[in-house]
Image (tube, rainbow, N blue to C red):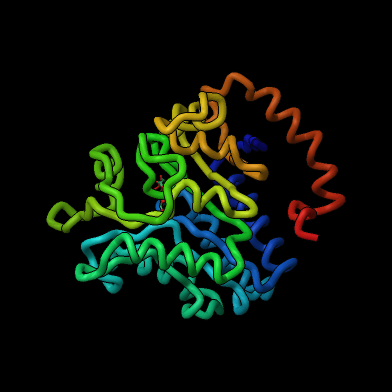
Amino acid sequence: MEVIILDDARAVADWGAQRIVELIQKKPQCVLGLATGSTPLAIYHQLVARFRQGELSFAGVTTFNLDEYVGIDAENPQSYRSYMARELFSGVDIDTRKSHFPNCEPAQNPRSRGSAYEQLIKDSGGIDLQILGLGSNGHIGFNEPCSSLSSRTRIKTLTESTVADNSRLFAPEEYQPHLAMTMGIATILEARRVMLFATGAHKAAAVRDAIEGPLSASCQASALQWHERATVIVDEAAATLLKNADYFRWAHSENEPIMAQFGHFYELD
Ligand code: F6R
């Protein structure tokens, strides 16, 4: 696992946006796995700005979001489809017919919806780069603690802690869903590259458990230890509990010249 510790959330977003720009420039028809939440917002806004400057085009890009709420419709401003439209898609030239969400309408069978999403990912050639945020309880996607590490796209009940964490985004009288469809851990592990972003002191314990803890269903993000090309990018505040922080900083400075010479996605050549 590659761990990159940067000064602050701004540097984390700069790093993430730069990697996505590089990937799209290198592989214009790439398949991106996307997350919602607060963490990737600054990345998405930078991508919009860099698109406007003519640095990249999303015209060939296919996207798969990690998760979508169950119990609200796609037009609801709280849906993850609305989030993506607001924060990224409406600002770039993406063909939204190629932007997919693991949604499940009330009359639909979540099991068959999950399998259909898995098939769609396969049919699109698989995910080149999966972007992830990190729940304070260690979840990635909505794979809550003790989910199977072999899980596939399916319906999940959110934990009380996740509902509480996300309640900041809902008005007091607004309906907050507690069910979601989410890619599974096995789905995420199949992406060719995975990048997990975490910022802020409230993520420090989950960052420690994900990187240095045992591989355990109790911390779903620890499953990334099993991925051949997973990078975790954190700011100093989220890195405070890492025992190996100095080693990670040193390894990053050693790796930088290699990345500068060959590019971060040199394995796609
Ligand atoms: C969102 C998602 C979640 C979030 C996580 C962190 O699509 O899958 O796993 O990435 O809950 O959320 P923020 O970034 O709001 O702290």
Q: What's the residue at 56%, 39% (across, down)?
A: 224
Specify the quadrant of the image occupied by residue 113. bottom left
Q: What's the residue at 48%, 72% (across, down)?
A: 99
Q: What's the residue at 74%, 35% (across, down)?
A: 252
Q: Is residue 161 above or below residue 58?
A: above
Where the C terminus falls, by quadrant?
bottom right
Q: Residue furthest top?
A: 243
Q: Is residue 68 above or below residue 89?
A: above
Q: Position of residue 72 (x, y in %)?
A: 23, 65
- Asked whether residue 36 appears in the rendered view, the answer is no
Q: Position of residue 208 (x, y in %)?
A: 51, 27
Compared across the picture, whether 81 is left or right of 194 comes to: left
Q: Position of residue 216 (x, y in %)?
A: 46, 29
Q: What's the residue at 31%, 64% (across, down)?
A: 79
- Asked whether residue 177 appears in the rendered view, the answer is yes
Q: Nearer the viewer, residue 23 or 171?
A: 23
Compared across the picture, whether 135 is left or right of 167 comes to: right
Specify the quadrant of the image occupied by residue 1. top right
Q: Nearer the viewer, residue 234 or 72?
A: 72
Q: Residue furthest left?
A: 173
